[in-house]
């Protein structure tokens, strides 16, 4: 008797919603969605992992905002207050920091998997462009968020990071002043970074993410490059709902577990408060995802021909980034169904380069 | 061979140099002969010079004034051709003295073993600075040693003989009008004070062995007191005093001990001043006075110590001990802390155990015994609690928990302990309790913060374990659900 009542309520609720929002249409759409099932399917989950971690970032970020104060005199103290006095503040802050790093890692893995599986090819060029934009935004989130606790390491890392931007000819100085809100890293820089981190970047990120997800939903999940010649009966699919979604959920739960363990066992340190008049501590290093660029610039000689080494390095990374971004544009072979092994070699080189330079950055002084 | 030639040459040079001076005194010094016939100011130098130590060394007038002392012809004797300079100019008259006194060989000729660095010392001293009207150095050789009737320092007639030097220095330093030209802030009562000191009294009685101005300040190398080169710069004073006061032979004449310096250097004050360079730590003169040096009287010791230890003095003077000590002629602070060998006080000094100084006077059944016992119990209790709480906070910190607020509060306990130890000097249980009680309150809060932090540490891990377990169960459940679902689907297919 009780069960029949419950069903009735469920049914009645469904039909109430269906009548207004056409849920049946959505369910039909979801039922038709599928994900190719083959040996590389594992890589398809990383976009979802990045999305989960972004959601975690939004939630924990909003919670942190309730206590954080983005001024030179109170930023460090407010973060300390969050970590020591606010109930579970330490956990929220630690999760926010770890989740940011894991999100960027997931985004990198997602990008390289899309690259190697050549999922950027026509008709998914715009999905690639928005995805690349999301990665750049994620790194910008990381760079701006790193300064917010206003501790010694963050202060000098920001100084070094913005100094590099200032090396660019003509536009270097205006960029540096735009970032710093003046010539030096001061309270104005902190306010500016805080504004970027909680208002400007989330706005841009949300638009890019919405576009990225809409494109995926409209175009479906990309199939492997070599499936075009396979007969339909040899192509295997997993229904997006519920199978792929449940698998994704399973991975999300594992990620949440990993995140919780990292946050509890390796809580993010606060360090000492930034002192603009103190000398820079030894071994200032950027966050790991900037390390390969930082280390490359360190390896370059002071002057190359008539240009400064740093300028050459920044220009090289700029050009490489643009070429990477435009890969759907200049890769003419893949859309025609031909194998483009150069793409793979470039990708392998990029992965090795990033891994080696990052490791060197951490082990060398 | 070369050395031999060099020695011969030196001997020849010296004999020539000495013959020039001796030759003149072998015959009658004609300057004196003539000047004795003159009146007043021209007669006086000649009359005085025959008593001068330089005259006894056969140095003629021309030794300083130039000219030819052998000639009885005034025009020749006082001719510029013969180097006559007349009365040396005030600004450079010291040059006449240093011709010999800065020349080791010249001094050797006169059989003198006087040091030849006096001018080197004087040149750097405060006295050799130019006068305000720029007529030369403030004080030069003549200013102190006079002229024409100079005597050896150990000659009681010398202007710088120990019993005379005080009035010599006082001629400038007690003259307010003169001193304000150079240092208006410098007191001019040193001589007045000196006369009230044991040193001054003995000196006035003619004792040349007691300290006078030069004994402490030096003679030629005198610097401002704040100049670290000065003999009386704070860190140099103990050594200066010890020159006499550690001389057991000298001190035995005055029936005084000679171990003060050796005690002082080991004391908390001596270590602070001499080893740590803490200029706020007292030197000999801070307790005994400098120009008016005298041992403090039994009843005034707390006042002397109280110049620095103000609170201790105030508390002691209100305490029941003040009256008792005065009645029994106990030297106040010194009774418990000693004088020159004051060691760093420890909590072991109070209480009823053997090491306690309280037990020197109090016995089992008196009121002081009970107060001493209770003070020690509270003091030990707070100290132990402080150590334990620190351990708890350290453990919390090691576990990665932030207890900086509690650690910061705990620093106040150290301050309260200092205040409580100071309040012991009131020898009043209520006052002591008033001082020490806030410490226990802080300890309570800090300890709780530490324990809470450690509990929180375990709570986090327990919470994490439960959360991880739940999520893991969900993962496993989901895994089997997916497997079951896909198996069913495969069967259908």
Image (cartoon, coloured by chain):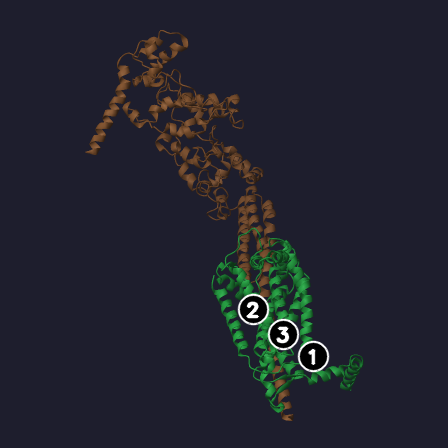
Label 1 – label 3 distance at C-alpha: 14 Å
Q: Nearer the viewer, residue B264 or B26?
A: B26
The kind of secondary structure element at disc 3 is helix
Q: Is residue A221 above or below residue B139?
A: below
- Tell me if residue A300 can be seen: yes
The structure residue drawn at horizontal position 26% and vertical position 14%, both measured from the top left corner, is B26
Question: Which is nearer the N-term, disc 1 or disc 2?
Answer: 1
Q: Nearer the viewer, residue A55 or B388?
A: A55
Q: Position of residue A259 (x, y in %)?
A: 59, 71
Q: Which residue is mark 2?
A: A320
Q: Is residue B359 above or below residue A260?
A: above
Question: Which is nearer the N-term, disc 1 or disc 3?
Answer: 3
Q: Chain of mark 2?
A: A
Q: Which mark is residue A128?
A: 3
Dots 1, 3 in contact, CB < 8 A: no
Q: Chain of mark 1?
A: A
- In the rendered image of the structure, the colour used to display chain B is brown
Question: Which is nearer the N-term, disc 2 or disc 3?
Answer: 3
Label 1 – label 2 distance at C-alpha: 30 Å
Please give the letter of the chain rendered in green.
A
Q: Position of residue B442 (x, y in %)?
A: 60, 53
In the image: residue B152, left or right of residue A116:
left
- Total of numbered circles in the picture? 3
The kind of secondary structure element at disc 2 is helix
Q: Which residue is mark 1?
A: A218
């Amino acid at each position: 008797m009780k069960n029949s009542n419950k069903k009735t309520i469920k049914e009645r609720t469904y039909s109430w919603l269906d009548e207004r929002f056409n849920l049946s249409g959505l369910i039909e759409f979801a039922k038709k969605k599928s994900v190719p099932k083959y040996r590389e399917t594992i890589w398809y989950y990383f976009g979802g992992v990045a999305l989960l971690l972004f959601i975690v970032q939004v939630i924990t970020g909003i919670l942190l905002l309730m206590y954080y104060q983005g001024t030179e005199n109170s930023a460090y103290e407010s973060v300390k207050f969050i970590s020591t006095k606010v109930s579970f503040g330490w956990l929220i802050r630690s999760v926010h920091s770890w989740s940011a790093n894991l999100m960027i890692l997931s985004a990198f893995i997602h990008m390289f998997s899309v690259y190697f599986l050549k999922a950027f090819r026509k008709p998914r060029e715009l999905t690639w462009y928005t995805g690349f934009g999301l990665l750049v935004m994620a790194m910008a989130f990381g760079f701006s968020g790193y300064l917010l606790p206003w501790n010694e390491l963050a202060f000098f890392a920001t100084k070094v990071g913005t100094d590099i931007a200032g090396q660019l000819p003509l536009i270097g100085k205006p960029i540096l002043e735009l970032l710093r809100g003046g010539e030096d890293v001061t309270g104005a820089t902190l306010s500016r970074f805080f504004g970027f981190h909680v208002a400007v970047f989330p706005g841009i990120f949300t638009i890019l993410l919405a576009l990225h997800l809409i494109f995926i939903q409209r175009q479906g999940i990309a199939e492997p490059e070599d499936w075009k010649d396979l007969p339909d009966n040899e192509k295997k699919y997993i229904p997006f709902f519920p199978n792929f979604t449940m698998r994704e959920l399973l991975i999300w739960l594992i990620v949440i577990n990993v995140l919780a363990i990292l946050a509890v066992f390796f809580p993010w340190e606060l360090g000492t408060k930034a002192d603009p008049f103190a000398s820079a501590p030894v071994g200032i290093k950027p966050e790991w995802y900037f390390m390969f660029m930082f280390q490359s610039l360190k390896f370059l000689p002071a002057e190359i021909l008539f240009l400064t080494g740093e300028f050459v390095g920044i220009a090289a990374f700029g050009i490489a980034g643009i070429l990477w971004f435009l890969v759907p544009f200049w890769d003419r072979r893949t859309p025609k169904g031909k194998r483009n092994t150069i793409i793979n070699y470039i990708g392998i080189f990029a992965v090795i380069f990033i891994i080696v330079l990052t490791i060197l950055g951490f082990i060398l002084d | 061979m070369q050395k031999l030639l060099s020695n011969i040459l030196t001997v020849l040079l010296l004999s020539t140099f000495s013959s020039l001076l001796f030759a003149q005194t072998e015959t009658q010094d004609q300057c004196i002969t003539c000047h004795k016939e003159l009146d007043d100011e021209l007669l006086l130098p000649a009359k005085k010079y025959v008593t001068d130590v330089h005259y006894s060394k056969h140095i003629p007038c021309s030794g300083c004034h130039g000219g030819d002392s052998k000639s009885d012809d005034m025009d020749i004797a006082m001719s510029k051709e013969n180097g006559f300079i007349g009365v040396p100019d005030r600004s450079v008259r010291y040059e006449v003295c240093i011709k010999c006194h800065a020349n080791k060989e010249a001094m050797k000729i006169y059989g003198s073993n006087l040091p030849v660095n006096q001018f080197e010392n004087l040149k750097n001293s405060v006295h050799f600075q130019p006068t305000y009207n720029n007529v030369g150095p403030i004080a030069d050789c003549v200013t102190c040693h006079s002229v024409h009737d100079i005597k050896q320092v150990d000659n009681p007639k010398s202007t710088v003989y120990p019993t005379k030097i005080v009035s010599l220095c006082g001629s400038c330093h007690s003259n307010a009008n003169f001193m304000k030209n150079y240092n208006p802030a410098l007191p001019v009562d040193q001589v007045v004070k000196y006369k009230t000191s044991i040193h001054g009294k003995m000196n006035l009685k003619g004792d040349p062995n007691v300290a006078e101005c030069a004994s402490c300040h030096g003679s030629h190398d005198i610097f401002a007191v704040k100049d670290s080169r000065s003999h009386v710069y704070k860190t140099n004073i103990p050594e200066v005093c010890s020159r006499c006061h550690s001389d057991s032979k000298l001190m035995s004449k005055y029936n005084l001990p000679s171990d003060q310096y050796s005690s002082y250097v080991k004391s908390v004050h001596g270590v602070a001043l001499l080893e740590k360079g803490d200029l706020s730590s007292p030197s000999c003169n801070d307790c005994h006075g400098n120009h008016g040096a005298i041992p403090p009287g039994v009843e005034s010791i707390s006042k002397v110590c109280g110049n620095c230890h103000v609170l201790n003095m105030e508390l002691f003077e209100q305490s029941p001990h003040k009256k008792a000590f005065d009645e029994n002629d106990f030297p106040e602070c010194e009774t418990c802390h000693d004088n020159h060998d004051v060691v760093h006080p420890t909590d072991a000094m109070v209480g009823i155990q053997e090491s306690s100084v309280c037990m020197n006077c109090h016995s089992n059944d008196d009121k002081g015994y009970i107060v001493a016992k209770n003070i020690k119990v509270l003091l030990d209790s707070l100290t132990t609690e402080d150590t334990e709480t620190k351990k708890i906070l350290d453990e919390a910190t090691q576990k990665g928990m932030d207890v900086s607020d509690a650690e910061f509060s705990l620093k106040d306990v150290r301050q309260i302990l200092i205040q409580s130890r100071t309040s012991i000097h009131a020898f009043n249980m209520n006052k002591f309790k008033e001082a020490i009680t806030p410490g226990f309150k802080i300890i309570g809060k800090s300890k709780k913060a530490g324990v809470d932090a450690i509990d929180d540490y375990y709570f986090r891990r327990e919470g994490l374990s439960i959360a991880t377990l739940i999520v893991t169960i969900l993962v496993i459940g989901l895994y089997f659900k997916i497997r079951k679902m896909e198996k069913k689907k495969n069967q259908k297919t």
